[in-house]
Amino acid sequence: MRTIVCIKQVPESASDVTINPEDNTLNREGAEAIINPFDEYAIEEALLLKERHGGDIWVISMGPAQAEKALKQALAMGADEAVLLNDPNFAGSDTLATSYALSRAIARIGDYDLVVCGKQAIDGDTAQVGPGIATRLGLAQLTYVCKVVDLNPEGRAVTVHRMLEGCVEAIRGRLPAVLTVVKDINQPRYPSLLGIRKANKRTIDVWGAADVGADPTRIGLGGSPTWVERVFTPPMRAGGVVFEGEVDEVVEKLVRKMQADGLA
C-alpha cells in the first residue's frame, strides 16, 4: 500500500510573516518555519496505517529550498521518500494552482492508495488544497477525518469518522481517496535520534514544473485566479457610545439613538 502525504512549511509565528510589496505575496525565505501542525497528524496517520498494512510513504511539499527541513523531519519520523516541488514558476501560487501542482506530482509518483493532508494550513486557513487535489485527480475526498475506522486495500475501500459541528459522521469511500485530517485523529510521534541522523544524510529529490508536466498557465501568479490587491492596516475605530442607568432607561436611550441614526 502506498500513502502520499502533502505537507507545507509555514512561519512559526505571525511575527515572522512579511509581505512582498511588489506582488503582495508572503515572503517565506529566511523566516523561522515549521511543519504545518495539522500536517504532522497527517504524517503520523500515514505511519500508523503503514504499521498495520505495510507499504511505503511518500511526502511532498511545494515551497522554497528551506522546505527541505520539513521533509527531513518527515523522513526522521518514518516516511520512506520525500520530494520538494521547487521552481520559480510555482511562486505566488494560490490554493487552486498549488493543488494543481501537487496533483501533478502525485500523478508522477503513481500507484497510490491514499493521499493524506492536514485539514488546513495555519498561515492561510482555507482548507482548500486537499479537496482541490481530490478534484484534479478524480478521487473521493473524505475531509475533517478524526478516525480511520477500517482500511481494506484489497477490497479498495476505506471507512472513516468525520468530525462535524455537533456530531461525528461515519462515511465509506473507495480507494484511492484523499483524506484531510484533524488533530483529534492521533498524537504525532517524536523522531528518534537514529531517524534524525538517517534523515540528515538523505538527499531530497527536487522536482520543477517541467518534471511533473505542469501547464505553465496553471501555476504561479499567472495561474492563480485569486490575488491580493492591497495590504493595509485598518484604521482604529472610535470608541462607542456608553449608556448608563437602569436597564429600562438604557434600552430607551439605545432605541432613541438607533432611531436618530436611521437604524430603527
Image (cartoon, grey):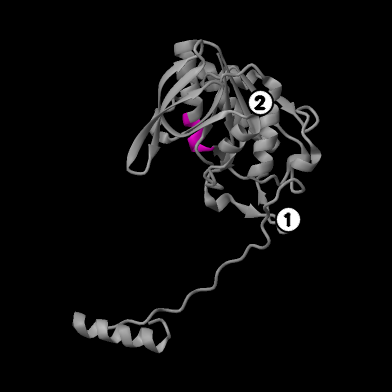
Amino acid at pointer 1: Asp
Q: Identify whether 19 is placed above or below 184.
A: below
The residue pinned by badge 1 equals 23
Local SS, label 2: helix
- Is 47 displayed left or right of 27 in the figure? left
Q: Identify whether 108 is placed above or below 36.
A: above
Between disc 1 and disc 2, whose residue precedes?
1
Task: Report the label total.
Answer: 2
Residue found 29% across the figure and 86% down from its top: 253
Q: Nearer the viewer, mark 1 or mark 2?
A: 2
Magenta includes 27?
Answer: no
Residue 21, image quadrant: bottom right
The residue pinned by badge 2 equals 106
Amino acid at pointer 2: Ile
Quarter that holds the N terminus: top right
Local SS, label 1: loop
Residue 95, image quadrant: top right
Residue found 67% across the figure and 63% down from its top: 230
- Is 17 displayed left or right of 168 in the figure? right
Is residue 244 in sight in this rendering?
Answer: no
